[in-house]
């Protein structure tokens, strides 16, 4: 029997699987259970069930865990959340309300027998130990970014996934955001000519209560650039290719709650002369750009206004709306990709080796900043990603 195939069309913010069989058409598609494929054989298109719903466990039910919970509904036809764990009683109580059918406990080890895969959304300094425990228990792992706080810890996790034969995916949700994906397609297609500069702004106010783990450089793994900027270094690598050199400047000015930098500016030069820039701050008390991507090309500029959910092209003095999407972080898209990889055996786009590269860039930029110099960003192992 050949490999299952399905018809797909781009609609809104996701690839929608088409009902009724046959090749893609201009007829709008309606959503179908993703656990069923449509096979093409001599008797026509036949619907068969290939797998039951995957059992997912959530480890960490706080801020980011709660964001994921709000999007689980989109994938309930493909998975069941059978377990959740958090050390905080208030987080567990809120989780029981949102996931009434899940086993909700304080100790994550108590849910491992009840799940096939886990989504880990806990403080960064805990990623290493908890992820190793889950992989060694034979579970597939979707791990919130950044993967871990040191290269050695990241390599431990990658090696454990290889040894266990389980999927490891790092949750770079921006890779799966519809606007970001469409901008990538336009850059690759050279729709507006060669891209020579990508600039990314992320301006927000992030300040936890006194003693919050976000404030600690040791627990966070650095500052705002490491914790949040890793999303956007990952995007720059994805858009622009192999980095050559770069520089970073960070400051705690006006973000005194941070032990590491609360504001950062990073510039990276890529092979072929392309440039990438990221400005990020957790100290914004007001903002206009908010979350914005600009890709400057030979014949115009592509602008992704993430906060407003719109993609524009600017050519001369004209502006054209290219694409709109639904609101939200679209974490359901990355989770759907994770499920696809488990089902098909494919490697995740943001597997451990790929995800390590953005962290290697950040670590080298940090090291060069300490020495008041430029970072050599060649030889990061991108060919192995």
Image (cartoon, rainbow, N blue to C red):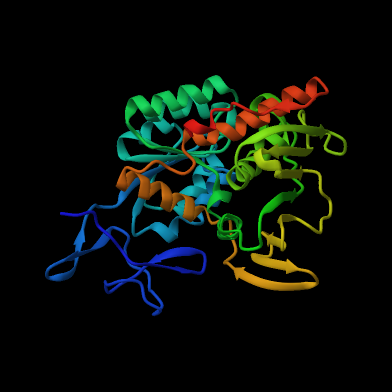
Relative to residue 120, is residue 252 drawn left or right?
Answer: right
Closest to the observer: 137 or 160?
Answer: 160
Relative to residue 112, is residue 151 drawn left or right?
Answer: right
> What is the quadrant of residue 24 in the picture?
bottom left
Residue ID at (67%, 24%): 218
Q: Is residue 72 above or below residue 32?
A: above
Counting from the top left corner in percent of width and height, residue 23 is at 31, 71
Counting from the top left corner in percent of width and height, residue 281 is at 77, 43
Counting from the top left corner in percent of width and height, residue 169 is at 45, 39
> What is the quadrant of residue 186 in the picture?
bottom right
Closest to the observer: 53 or 263?
Answer: 263
Relative to residue 120, is residue 272 drawn left or right?
Answer: right
Counting from the top left corner in percent of width and height, residue 343 is at 30, 47
Closest to the observer: 315 or 138?
Answer: 315
Closest to the observer: 52 or 385?
Answer: 385
Residue ID at (34%, 44%): 342
Tell me, yes or no, if residue 202 can be seen here: yes
Quadrant in the picture for the N terminus: bottom left
Tell me, yes or no, if residue 228 can be seen here: no
Q: Is residue 241 above or below residue 250?
A: below
Q: Residue furthest left?
A: 43
Residue ID at (32%, 42%): 345
Q: Residue furthest bottom?
A: 27
């Amino acid at each position: 029997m050949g490999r299952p195939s399905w018809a797909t069309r781009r609609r809104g913010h996701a690839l929608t699987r088409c009902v009724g069989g046959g090749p893609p058409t201009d007829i709008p598609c309606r959503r179908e259970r993703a656990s069923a494929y449509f096979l093409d054989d001599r008797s026509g298109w036949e619907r068969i069930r290939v797998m039951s719903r995957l059992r997912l466990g959530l480890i960490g039910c706080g801020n980011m865990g709660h964001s994921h919970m709000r999007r689980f509904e989109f994938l309930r036809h493909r998975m069941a959340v059978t377990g959740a764990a958090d050390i905080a009683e208030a987080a567990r109580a809120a989780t029981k309300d949102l996931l009434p059918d899940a086993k909700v406990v304080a100790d994550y080890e108590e849910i491992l027998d009840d799940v096939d895969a886990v989504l880990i959304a806990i403080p960064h300094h805990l990623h290493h130990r908890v992820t190793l425990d889950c992989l060694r228990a034979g579970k597939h792992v979707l791990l919130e970014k950044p993967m871990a706080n040191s290269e050695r810890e990241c390599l431990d996790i990658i090696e454990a996934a290889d040894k266990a034969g389980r999927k490891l995916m790092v949750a770079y949700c921006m890779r799966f955001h519809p606007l970001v994906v469409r901008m990538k397609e336009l850059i690759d297609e050279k729709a507006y000519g060669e891209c020579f500069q990508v600039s990314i702004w992320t301006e927000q106010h992030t300040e936890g209560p006194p003693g919050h783990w976000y404030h600690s450089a040791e627990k966070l793994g650095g500052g705002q650039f490491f914790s949040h900027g890793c999303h956007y270094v990952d995007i720059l690598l994805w858009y622009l290719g192999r980095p050559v050199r770069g520089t970073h400047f960070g400051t705690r000015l006006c973000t005194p709650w941070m032990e590491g930098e609360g504001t950062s500016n990073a510039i990276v030069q890529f092979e072929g002369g392309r440039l990438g820039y990221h400005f990020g701050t957790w100290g914004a008390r007001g903002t206009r750009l908010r979350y914005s991507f600009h890709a400057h090309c030979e014949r115009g500029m592509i602008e992704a206004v993430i906060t407003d959910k719109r993609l524009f092209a600017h050519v001369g003095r004209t502006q054209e709306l290219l694409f709109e999407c639904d609101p939200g972080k679209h974490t359901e898209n990355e989770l759907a990709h994770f499920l696809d990889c488990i089902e098909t055996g494919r490697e995740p786009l943001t597997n451990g080796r790929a995800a390590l590269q953005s962290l290697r860039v950040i670590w080298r930029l940090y090291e060069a900043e300490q020495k008041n110099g430029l970072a050599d960003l060649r030889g990061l192992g991108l060919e192995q990603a």
